[in-house]
Amino acid sequence: MKVLISGICGFAGSHIARYLREAHEGITISGFDSLARAGSEINRTALKRLGIPVFHGDVRVASDLETLPAADWVIDAAAQPSVLAGRDGRTSSRQLLEHNLLGTINLLEYCLASRAGLILLSTSRVYSIAALIGLPLHEESSAFVLDAAQAWPEGVGREGVGEEFSTDAPISLYGATKLASERLAQEYAGGFGVPVWINRCGVLAGAGQFGTAEQGIFSYWIHAHHARRSLKYLGFGGHGFQVRDALHPRDLAAMVDWQMQSSGGGQLFNVSGGHANSMSLKQLTCWCNDRFGTHHPVEDGSERPYDVPWLILDSSRATAATGWKPKIGMEEILGEIAEHAKAHPDWLERSGA
């Protein structure tokens, strides 16, 4: 099998490449990356040691894909991954659209020409912000939880937000590019027979992530706490009760591996850590206090665009169809990030955070 990974020097792409190399003999893995993000060269060097070739190329530029090696499967791990992309002053809205949407179009055209399948890494942020903010919640153990005494909207259950939950706008410019990419991929699957799998991922987390306050929050928070950087609880009363779930990229890689081994394609799954791997910022701070010593975030109730109080994905559809479940628990995820923070105290600077 021949596999091509876009964004191979990113957190998800590099982990998937290493997982597949370890899991299969005779597999051919290559990838390309623009190397625009600070820290990308670190992963490029590590991949080179494994004999995985990395080509310099920008997913936005169709001609950059013309000389890439043939593949049976393309894994799209290239993206502007921040929910604030296009509004953060660092990335323009046009740059975001070109990277996340035009990039998907270029990859789909590559797949069409080379008869390859596509595995699209999408996001939990395709779900409606208004609907998420409107969920009935109450505080329990320093975290927001669903209020069982009130009615829940369609697509929400005890395990979290399912694939049927609303994707109505607003979902952020970032979320809109990923949702549009999903739709285009499905159209190429239906219209041209391109095998397609779509994975809506929860928050990826693990050692070596280039985390920021807008993306990769678990990694960023632990590194910043260890470095005694200023931290803030933004919005929702400024108490840090907002909750997300964490997924280790090796668990994501296991799902990608299963999908490539299966015939056909065409399904869309939530792929996340779920309830067992969920935590509020306040709870994460308590964990860090126990690990590194006390460091108090500022309670700042300022609202930030696109923030939501609670988002845990329900991956039961993926489990029922594939038998997949995350194997790496929250304590292991946080522990490996903490060890990485101790070993690399300058990591936030090296990764451009």
Image: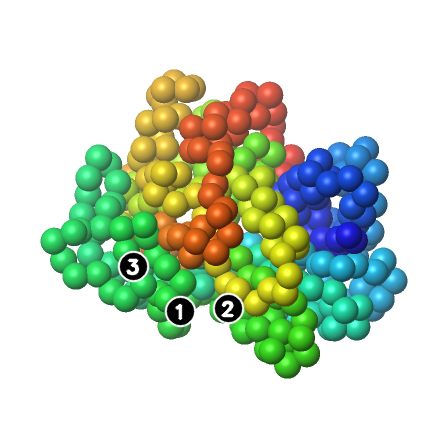
Looking at the image, residue 325 sits to the left or right of residue 149; the answer is right
Whether 193 is drawn above or below 7: the answer is below
Distance Cα–Cα, label 3 vs label 1: 13 Å
| Residue type, label 3 | Val
Whether 295 is drawn above or below 211: the answer is above
Q: Residues within 10 Å of mark 3 (few under 14, many from 20)?
A: many
Asked whether the viewer can see residue 307, the reply is yes
Residue 65 horizontal/vertical position (percent): 80, 64
Rendered residue at 60%/28% (across/down): 346
Read off the residue under disc 3: 156
Q: Quadrant of the C terminus?
A: top right
Q: Secondary structure at mark 2?
A: helix
Q: Nearer the viewer, mark 2 or mark 3?
A: 3
Whether 47 is drawn above or below 107: the answer is above
Read off the residue under disc 1: 167
Q: How is the image coloured?
A: rainbow
Rendered residue at 56%/54% (across/down): 81
Residues 117 and 62: in front is 117
